Image (spheres, rainbow, N blue to C red):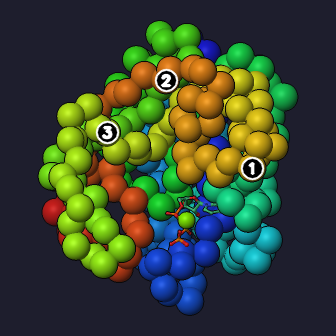
Amino acid sequence: MRGLWAVVPAAGRGTRFGSEVPKQYLDVDGQPLIAYTLAALLAHPLVEGAVVVVSENDADWPGWNETFRIAAAGKPVSTAIGGATRAASVLSGISALPDSVRADDFVLVHDAARPNLALDDLQKLVERGREDPVGAILAAPVRDTLKRAGDDGGIDRTEPRERLWRALTPQMFRRLQLSKALEDAAKAGVEATDESMAMERQGLRPLLVEGSEDNFKITTPADLARFRFILSQR
Ligand code: CTP
Ligand code: MG
């Protein structure tokens, strides 16, 4: 079986989190958050290495060496400079993949802000995704009842939640197809908020692979508190 490379977008500012240091670099039990994310990805035997996409401001972050030493487990990890949107950052990461990653090889894209990815979920995604011609994403079914709000904050109606899923990461697509899809979306002025959205625009139908709700994205301080709690229970 061919190995896989991962692209880890980490060039965001964490506006909703609101900390001075971007959330991916916050210390959690002596390690920066992003070290947990990298370790979770690189724990998979088929994951050969990773490109971490950082913002220009963070490229010289002094924690990198230590992070890579802890998390990379001897696997190659390099950095690329990101862009103004997540999609631009991912595109930059794909361009920075080594030449050994062929055009039709699958690549994993995983948010730096999702440190709690379980190896089981990653394994399930890789197994199911590589059998799909397009690729696959981890996702979770919507469980809450959905309300459509009016301008005044009142509820206009209840939306059916049947067949609605929340897109998680990693998402797994072929290198060339994904970069083309992201480029096309950018040219059309469409901001693809995940890789799958760019692929769907091409008329492709990625596979949904149900993943754990525990693979949540750190968006606000409450999410970080939840992750700290999970760590304390490990
Ligand atoms: N990301 C990126 N480049 C951007 C924007 C986001 O690489 N221009 C990354 C983030 O670092 C994060 C992932 O994409 O790992 C998911 O984005 P999100 O959780 O929205 O993080 P931020 O954009 O940093 O947060 P916010 O939207 O609150 O500003
Ligand atoms: Mg964002």
Sequence-wise first label, 3 or 1 = 3
Q: Which residue is mark 2?
A: 206
- Within 10 Å of disc 1 (Cα), the crowding (few <14, some 14-19, many 20+) is few
Q: Which residue is mark 1?
A: 189
- The answer to whether residue 207 is left or right of residue 20 is left
Secondary element under disc 1, as helix, strand or loop, is loop
Secondary element under disc 3, as helix, strand or loop, is strand
Q: Residue at x 45, y 43 (%)?
A: 169
Using the numbered discs, state the Cα–Cα distance from disc 1 to disc 2 in whole angstroms.
22 Å
Between disc 1 and disc 2, the foreground one is: 1
Does mark 3's beta carbon lie closer than 8 Å to ligand 1?
no
Inspect the image, locate mark 2, and give the three-letter code of the amino acid beneath it: Pro
Q: Which labelled disc corresponds to residue 165?
A: 3
Q: Residue at x 72, y 41 (%)?
A: 185
- Within 10 Å of disc 2 (Cα), the crowding (few <14, some 14-19, many 20+) is many
> Percent position (x, y) of residue 55?
73, 68
Please say if the residues under marks 3 and 1 sit with CB atoms less than 8 Å apart.
no
Residue closest to the eye, 13 or 163:
163
The picture quadrant for ligand 2 comes to bottom right
> Percent position (x, y) of residue 196?
54, 35
Sequence-wise first label, 2 or 3 = 3
Sequence-wise first label, 1 or 2 = 1
Residue closest to the eye, 157 or 196:
157
Inspect the image, locate mark 1, and give the three-letter code of the amino acid beneath it: Gly
> Percent position (x, y) of residue 12?
62, 68
Give the total number of marks visible in the rendering. 3
Q: Which labelled disc corresponds to residue 1?
A: none
Secondary element under disc 2, as helix, strand or loop, is loop
Q: Residue at x 76, y 61 (%)?
A: 83
* Residue 103 shows up from this direction: yes
- Quadrant where the N terminus is found in the figure: top right
